[in-house]
Amino acid sequence: MDKKTNISVKKINILDLEQTELKEFLQKLGYKTFHAVQITKWIYRGAAGFDTMSDLSKDLREILAEKAEIGALKQKKILESADEGTVKFLFGLPDGNVIESVLMKYHHGPAACISSQIGCKMGCEFCASSKAAFSRNLTAGEMAEQVILMGRYGGERISSVVVMGIGEPLDNYENLVRFLKIINAKDGLNIGYRHITVSTCGLVPQIIRLSKEGLPINLSLSLHASNDSTRSRLMPINGKYSIDKTVEACKIYSEATKRRITFEYALIGGLNDSRTDALELSKRLKGLMCHVNLIHLNEVEGIALKKSSAQKELLFKKVLESAGIPVTVRRKLGDDIEAACGQLRRREIKDGEC
Ligand code: SAH
């Protein structure tokens, strides 16, 4: 609240700021820029407020508390899976929205899977997120806070981040890039770009733009089909950018960043899982620096699509392998806690709890 006017002034979320911006903010308040490093270190050591930042002067702490806040997410629900180490979080935002994030345990350390938007506009047929309404983009700080809170819960440094939760990250481009720089900052979370993966349904112009940012992050492309007619049936984005254009953009990305592209392919019974589909996919990806990740379709209530049989999956994998395409089957994590994108938020909205 502004004391003179009695009008409430929106506080700055410190987590939204890159280091240079935090320095500028301090300068505007009349303080030295070196406090930015102190503040950042405190935040990533777990400080939830400015009052505990004991190496800052009392007046700086007071002015910061008046003008700024450190995040705004509230833990609404935590579900621990019987699968070892997978934890799903439902976070509440001050505007009443809810988002989901997942903490996964891998041999190389904990990975945080975060949401980039509240809802999604892309309309993919198989995805629970598409069935719940789109509300808004998340800010960079709201994305970073998911990583911070999950790291705090797990008590271990997050070693990798995947932007594969609710939303289409490349449809929230500026905030996404800002977020990537924030979590990469040396005095902050210090997560190397090579340990960050962004998953997209294939927004071709943004993939090309991202290839020029100089951020060597991993790109995961949700392909899910080997031809335009099947892909367009499953993913409306294909009506705008054909498979040819999408794969070409991935090629440009991998050549610019020297990173291998992962193609995500959820096997759907009788729809995209035949031998012909596998052969067609092999042909398309031949010569590309890539890897195919076969996914078990998570069957979602109200969506008629069914997962493929184990036999079909094995055959599909063999066809790709014979063509020399590296392929893995994604480890199935957290089925019992509805870890599939958007399922928990959808239930929460249906139950009317938020
Ligand atoms: N919008 C981005 C990221 C969010 S979806 C994207 O499309 O990539 C994250 C991943 O989960 C994508 O590969 C998506 O295709 C996949 N996915 C969504 N619903 C699924 C379901 N029901 N079963 C299996 N994978 C699903």
Image: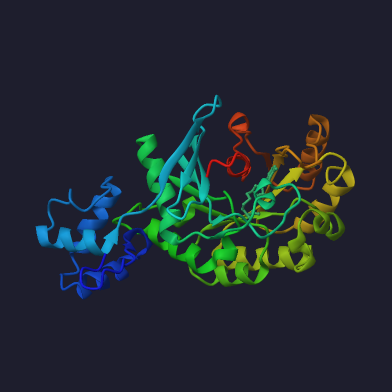
Tally the numbered discs. Answer: 0
Q: Nearer the viewer, residue 62 or 326?
A: 62
Q: Quadrant of the N terminus?
A: bottom left
Q: Nearer the viewer, residue 5 or 149?
A: 5
The x, y position of residue 52, in whole percent, is 18, 48
State the residue at coordinates (51%, 32%).
79
The x, y position of residue 214, in whole percent, is 48, 69
Placement of 82 over or under 323, stated as above or below: above
Placement of 132 over or under 240, stated as above or below: above
The x, y position of residue 285, in whole percent, is 75, 56
Tell me, yes or no, if residue 108 can be seen here.
no
Placement of 206 over or under 119, stated as above or below: below
State the residue at coordinates (55%, 68%).
210
State the residue at coordinates (71%, 67%).
248
Placement of 235 over or under 315, stated as above or below: below
Q: Is residue 165 left or right of residue 273?
A: left
